Amino acid sequence: MNEEMMTTETRQSANAPASPAAKRYFVKTYGCQMNVYDSQRMADALAADGYSATERPDEADLILLNTCHIREKAAEKVYSEVGRLREIKAQRKAAGRQTTIAVAGCVAQAEGAEIIRRAPLVDLVIGPQTYHRLPAAVNRALSGEKVIETDYAVEDKFDHLPAPKPAATRSRGVTAFLTVQEGCDKFCTFCVVPYTRGAEVSRPVGQILAEANRLAASGVREVTLLGQNVNAWHGEGPDGRAWGLGELLRRLAGIPGLARLRYTTSHPRDMDDGLIAAHRDLPVLMPYLHLPVQAGSDRILKAMNRRHTAEDYIRLVERIRAVRPDIALSGDFIVGFPGETDADFEDTLDLVRKVGYATAYSFKYSPRAGTPGADMADQVPEDVKDKRLQALQDLLDEQQAEFVRHLKGKPVEILIERAGKEPGLVVGRSPWLQPVIVDEKAGGIGDIVTVRITGTGYTLYAEPL
Ligand code: 5AD
Ligand code: SF4
């Protein structure tokens, strides 16, 4: 799971101007990139059903909340968000207009019918594996039925991903996500994902290549392969051989127009030789790897059911760096897992010092109902978690600052993604995912150009070369 977008809320932007009579939908997306991708696919399915997007919930005939369940109080947040829609629904009703309120995503999958019991305002609850049934489910809700769509067969999983339309994709810019894998079989004892996203399933090679070709044909330059456990992806290649993610990346690297590839999120246990070799051989595979370790104490890693030791992780990082020395590492950390002592926490700091992260996401452990961690003895007091989180974040912040400091004065290749907020500037992205602001003379959107870094911080500033 990648954390980058865990705390952001994304509003789906309108792709096309709406005709006044058209049905409108409003989507609010919480959580990870997989949800962002799913929201786009749901938008495509709704567009095919005659809907157009709006950024105003009070204009929407369908309000869709695509939810995240990864950490604390996720369900509570959804209930209060739904509460805020009460007035909109009432006002629209007074004006003779119907409003369908739908809850999708991982909270929908985890809570199911409970959502409608607690929030009768909700008309439709739909889990991530059943999005292909969305238009039909909305029609059922419109005729007054309370609809719960959370049951699925594993083999249906990728049916919920209607292909993105080239025209719609073009309006989304030069970077795109592409889901290749869903679900997780790892069962880390803190995590709800194996329960909400279900068992690991890999999307077939043919579907992935077709979608990647369509994206490239519509002007996309960078594709990020998504999966809860993306490096567990496996499939059968057109050559009849069993492929791992490394082979898939090799094939994608040959698609004309695709200049950058990324993938997220990986489990250390599934970084196989083929994938490490892809980092060695493919210049288009960006030198950035999100490889969560969660903790540095073997005792805690065992209690978390991570199935690797701190030493295993460090050796793995050494092997990857041996073939791709410029790779930047990113990680996820949890402090205050049940039973974590000061000495265990010191082991986490030690591991961070040994590895050196370009960026990282760290969290206080929060018990999730239904996971083994929630029932463990020795839950760590909140104030101890607070102190440990602060100490860890201080260290990670130092490492991050160190990483960007080194870039100052250096030439860096960026992919120009969009116009800047200020006229005359454009925003690109470095190989290590940092936004880079530069004069538009550097190049146009979709170009890959080399610029010199002049200022560093969360955002980098650069001058054309
Ligand atoms: N408490 C705190 N952090 C968690 N994460 C997942 N579950 C929990 C939890 N119960 C973090 C992990 C994971 C990231 C996506 O969220 O670090 O890698
Ligand atoms: Fe959750 Fe662990 Fe699976 Fe990642 S690998 S999604 S943390 S169970």
Image (cartoon, rainbow, N blue to C red):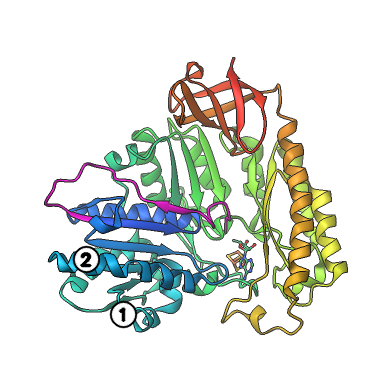
Query: Compared with residue 175, is residue 376 higher up or lower down, i.e. above or below?
Result: below
Looking at the rendered structure, the kind of residue marked 1 is Pro
Ligand 2 lies in which image quarter? bottom right
- Say which residue appears at 18% left-offset and 71% top-offset: 142
Please report the residue visible at 66 percent of the width from the left and 46 percent of the height from the top.
276
Whether residue 198 is visible: no
Which residue shows up at 33% across the image and 37% down it?
Answer: 170
State the residue in front, 393 or 166: 393
Mark-to-mark CA distance, 1 and 2: 17 Å
**Is residue 55 rendered to the left or right of residue 52?**
right
Tag on residue 63? none
x 27%, y 39%: residue: 167
Give the vertical position of 164 relative to 386 (above or below).
above
Mark 2: amino acid: Gln
Viewer-nearest residue: 435 or 271: 435
Residue range highlighted in magenta: 1-24
> Is any part of residue 462 visible from this angle?
yes
Q: Position of residue 18 (x, y in %)?
A: 19, 45
Q: Check disc 1 and report its element: helix, strand or loop.
A: loop
- Residue 427's spot in the image, x, y percent? 50, 30
Residue carrying label 1? 120
Q: Nearer the viewer, mark 1 or mark 2?
A: 2
- Which quadrant of the figure contains the N terminus? bottom right
Numbered-mark total? 2
Local crowd at mark 1 within 10 Å, few (<14), some, or many (≥20)?
A: few
Disc 2 target residue: 91
- As drawn, is 209 to the left or to the right of 410? left
